[in-house]
Image: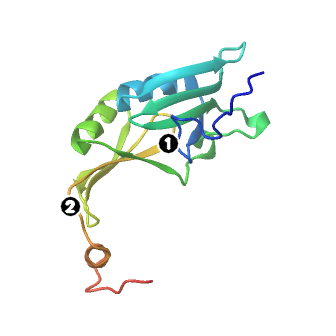
Amino acid sequence: MSTQAVKRIPEDMHTVTPHIVCADAVSAIDFYVKAFGATDTGKMLAPNGKLIHGMIRIGDSAIMLAEETPEWGSIGPLTLKGSPVTLHLYVQDADAAFKRAVDAGATAVMPPSDMFWGDRYGVVKDPYGHSWSIAHHVRDMTMEEMQEGAAKACGEPGGKQET
């Protein structure tokens, strides 16, 4: 055993890391490589070939994956018929990233458009049931400007900011 101190949070990890579950998780990793330019950093497979644990990196972020295993309470969004979670990607070109994801087999939910909060933003759903928002920043805005934009987007004139 080493007497050297071990970092509690590994050097290449962030404080919060998504850990997603899906049916056919091994093919999901292949899809994320094709659709989002992910790097497959490793897979641990069960004897039956199912993914016990895998990890990909998209840009500077890690995402852990596991195979849906209902008997262990690990259920993916297709079985659940949806998910309240959206994974958000900031990219250099939202339109190109959106097209790449759709070309790889994602379903277009909301094509990219310029949004009131200052991002060019669109949403896709991957074949495994996960929603991904894809954006690049186009304009720095104050909270007041965003609030005014939100009010207009919701059809309300003006609008007051809550504190």
Q: Quadrant of residue 35?
A: top left
- Label 2 or label 1, whichever lies nearer to me, is 2
| Residue 37 picture location, percent across and down | 36, 28
| Disc marking residue 80 | none
Q: Say whether residue 67 is left or right of residue 82.
A: right
User: Where residue 78 sits in the image (x, y, percent)?
Assistant: 57, 40
- The answer to whether residue 24 shows anywhere in this view is no
Give the residue displayed 51% in from the left and 23% down from the top.
Answer: 41
In this rendering, position of residue 106 left or right of residue 18: left
Residue at the (26%, 67%) spot, across then down: 116
Q: Is residue 16 visible?
A: yes
Please tell me in which quadrant of the rendered image residue 99 appears.
top left
- Toward the top, the furthest residue is 47
Q: Any mark on residue 130, and which?
A: 1
Question: Which of the two residues, 97 or 77, is positioned nearer the viewer here?
Answer: 97
Q: Can you say which quadrant of the picture contains the N terminus?
A: top right
